[in-house]
Amino acid sequence: MKTDKENFFGLVYQVVRLIPKGRVTSYGAIANYLGAKSGARTVGYAMNAAHTMHDVPAHRVVNSKGLLTGKFHFSPPDKMQASLESEGILIKNDQVVDFQKVFWDPNMELAL
DNA sequence: AGTGTGACAGATC
DNA sequence: CGATCTGCCACAC
């Protein structure tokens, strides 16, 4: 079995797994941390495979506006919001409340 | 090897 | 201010 670093996806998985409980991050932040600042879409695509093939807290990853864009990809979709609320993150209208407060930036915390 | 697509992001109208 | 369009990187077929 190859390590999670086998490709760009694995890198994304690791970063997502490093997200502390009660915190969230954005696709762009991860992409930027990986060096693909413009590859936010690739990060989102990675998450798609992440929750499908890997154990990754993808529910802690939202778009730059704190919106639970990919919640519909969960099973059930409500689980994403439920998981976030379970960690102390409030969700209002599919959006993270105080997104700025709970925002966890890998570039900042991991200090690349 | 080429084409299409994707859970985004930023800019423009 | 809100809606719309393009740009971007990496994977799947």
Image (spheres, coloured by chain):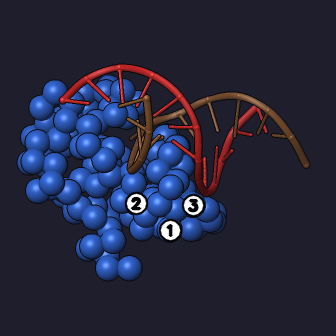
Chain colours: A blue, B brown, C red
Residue type beneath disc 3: Phe
Q: Secondary structure at mark 3?
A: helix
Asked where in the image residue A90 lies, by quadrant, the reply is top left
Q: On what subunit does the disc labeled 3 rest?
A: A
Q: Which residue is mark 3?
A: A8
Q: Position of residue B10 (x, y in %)?
A: 39, 50
Distance from the alpha carbon under mark 1 to that under mark 2: 8 Å
The residue pinned by badge 1 equals A35
Residue at 40% x, 60% y is A30
What amino acid type should be assigned to the residue bearing mark 2? Ile
Quarter holding the C terminus of chain A is bottom left
Kind of residue indicated by mark 1: Gly
Q: x, y percentage for residue C2?
A: 25, 23
Crowd tier of the residue under label 3, counting other residues whose Cα lies within 10 Å: few below 14, some 14–19, many 20 or above: some
The residue positioned 57% from the left and 60% from the top of the image is A8
> Which residue occupies 25% across, 32% down?
A79
Helix or strand or loop: what does disc 1 sit on? loop
SS for dot 2: helix
The Cα atoms of the two marked residues, 2 and 3, are separated by 11 Å
